[in-house]
Image (cartoon, coloured by chain):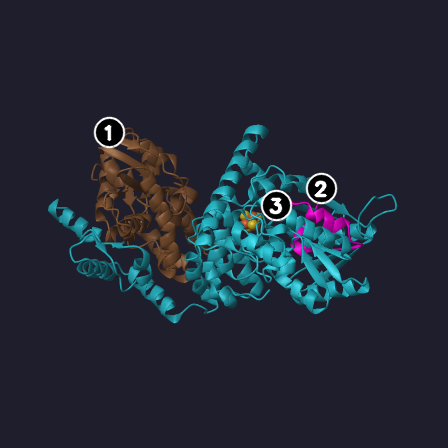
Chain colours: A brown, B cyan
Amino acid sequence: MRVGLFVTCLVDLMRPRIGFAALKLLEGAGCEVVVPEGQTCCGQPAYNAGDAATARGLALKVLDDFEGLDWVVAPSGSCGGQIVKAYPELLKDDPANHARALQLAARTRELTDFLVNVLKLEAVPGRFDGTVTYHDSCSGLRELGVKAQPRQLLARVPGLLLTEMGGCEECCGFGGTFSVKFGDISAQIAERKARNVQASGADAVVLGDLGCMLNIEGKLRRMGDENTRVLHVAEVLAGDA
Amino acid sequence: MRSQAMFFKARVGDKLADPVLQENLGKAKSKFVDARARAVAEYERDEGADFESLREAGRAIRNRTLANLDVWLETFEQKAGERGAQVKYARDGEEICRLVVEIARRHGVTKVVKSKSMLSEEAGLNKALAEAGIQPVETDLGEYILQINDNEPPSHIIAPAFHKSKEEVAELFTRTHGRPKKSGIEEMTREARETLRSHFLSAGMGISGGNFLIAETGSVTLVTNEGNGRMVTTMPKVHVVITGIEKVIPTLEDFATLMRLLPRSATGQHISNYVSVLTGVKRPEDLDGPEHLYFILVDNGRASLLGTEFQEMLRCIRCGACMNHCPVYQTVGGHAYGWVYPGPMGSVLTPLYTGIANALDLPHAATLCGQCSVVCPVKIPLPELLRGLREKQVDMDLRPKSERLALRLWGWVARRPSLYGLAAKLAVRYLNWLAEGRDRIPLLGIAPEWTKGRDFPAPQGRTFRELYAERRRREGR
Ligand code: SF4
């Protein structure tokens, strides 16, 4: 099975270790992982800013980059959602590419969803001594139905105890460019999230999207919380946390 | 009502710094959100049916209506006419005001009692009535509180005054009613009730909104919790219903379905305290009811959405669930949105009804988290509509040049992998230089809005593509 890893621009830029953790998990499960060299960004910033032309250009590029692979896997519900939901929409007036977009959408999965529902992974390499709480990122949860998958996998990590926080499905306030257009509102929403994380008493908040990760970590640190760790689910599962 | 939507961003600071508002928002959030969740769970348990199918049915009913809106409106007009009502159409707010004043004058009315009508807010009707020498009295408790507070605009579509604290209301009542200050909600409600009673008895005309218009019977339905709607629509000799043309539905059966959705979504009630189906004028055998009944059906921008990508918005049944569940609304409240409708539905409706160029911030004032569309009882894809409006702003050249340019440049670079790789590498170096060896950047010059309220975590060190290329070389591949 040839699996294309969609690294995502934020992992590339900010947290490469998450890309390597995803690689480790997929290879460990027996996949032949291909990391297309030319990949950059899924184009969501342009799509959400209303610049459909730019977003379409990048959609076509991703279609080319990931041509001919059995699966495309992203350690992000947000970028995964862009490929699955937005590409077919963006290309609906271009019959040939629309068909390609639909095919790509059908082959694209968020990482934990792929591990659970396609690979039916039983054991994970990681070990984590402590309590974690899981933040459901919006796109993964509401566009791709990622909810049970990460929890199922975390439950298999020796030493890890999962405790749910209040409002785990509530948005953290990131919202892409929203976070820099309306910084005040965004930071205030992040504060509610951070307080929920703290109230859960967990050692770490685990999540599946880089945007939320930077937002929540940034807020916790600004609030003077130096202890609560903010981890991507891939790092925890791979034992790299 | 004059739109203040251009000032969304400017108003946010005040809203965030208002402790009373913040406290009330916190309370309202848990109240509405928890109540809805409980009601949905109980529905699924007690009826053995899933709420999702009910939402689907609600969506289908509203779509069926909108597909032949003209036909259903004609049917409604005919049926209402058969029962002695007069149906009039208003193109915009101005026309609503003109028609209402005309009707009031015809019947020699000098005082009007009103129950909740969002259309009257759209039109700024109270001001027009007052200018015509007709006294409008709001009788919905929340609307009444706002009216006596110098006609403050509502901040929520079903709980218009919830931004006010009990103490603020007590002050206001003392000032307005000239009675000793009360502190309990029950006492205050009784005081409002006593004050309003005399207005009900002396008003010559009642004005109400309408939750739905039933085409097959020519009826209007009112869904309320306070009972004032019944007084407004039965005591005065004249009753005027003002509602949007999109509020029509085909049958009473459809109404039954929508009524399973509306109260649960709005307040978490299984059924509202009062549900009225009002048909025609008072007949000789009737005990009460108005002698004259008028319907003013309003366009005010609605018809222009038909057949466009925004038609789905016309399904809205004004339950308020989208704002109750919206993280942005929960943070800034309703007034910041600047017009009649706040929250996600307002961010779609305000630009569409008052001009896209007049509400540039609103479609962007959303994280697109999607929770609104998950709870919407008629499954309106609000985030997609908000994004559609963002696209419209780009198409109409309404975005700042710098933003347009930055996006295009970024898109151009992102289609050129080697250039992109270099840019990413430099960006990471730059961020790390700013971090000065720490794991965070407290002040980011290129994104000051980010670091106003939180730190920006520093990058790990090098880009994935650099590290991966290195690993491949090491492995000799
Ligand atoms: S958009 Fe949907 S959730 Fe919002 S008020 Fe209308 S019907 Fe209710």
In the image, what residue type sits under mark 2?
Answer: Leu
Image height check: is B264 above or below B142? above
Chain ID at mark 2: B
Query: Looking at the image, which is closer to me, A55 or B268?
Result: B268
In the image, what residue type sits under mark 1?
Answer: Pro
Does the beta carbon at disc 3 come under 8 Å from ligand 1?
A: no
Region in magenta: B224-251
Callout 2 and callout 1 share a chain: no
From where the camera sits, is residue A27 visible?
no
x then y, percent, for residue A21 = 23, 41
Tell which tag, 3 or 2, sits nearer the viewer.
3
Q: Which residue is mark 3?
A: B187
Q: Secondary structure at mark 3?
A: helix
Q: Secondary structure at mark 2?
A: helix
Q: Is residue B232 magenta?
A: yes
Query: Looking at the image, which is closer to me, B228 or B86?
Result: B228
- In the image, taking residue A204 as reference, residue B109 lies left or right, namely right
Q: Which residue is mark 1?
A: A158
Q: 10 Å neighbourhood of mark 2: few (<14), some, or many (≥20)?
A: some
In the image, what residue type sits under mark 3?
Answer: Glu
Q: Residue furthest bottom?
A: B401
Q: 10 Å neighbourhood of mark 1: few (<14), some, or many (≥20)?
A: some
Could you tell me how far apart the alpha carbons at marks 3 and 1 are, in whole angstroms? 59 Å
Which residue sits at x=33%, y=33%?
A: A163
Q: In the rendering, which numbered label is found on residue B252? A: 2
Report which quarter residue B418 is drawn in.
bottom left
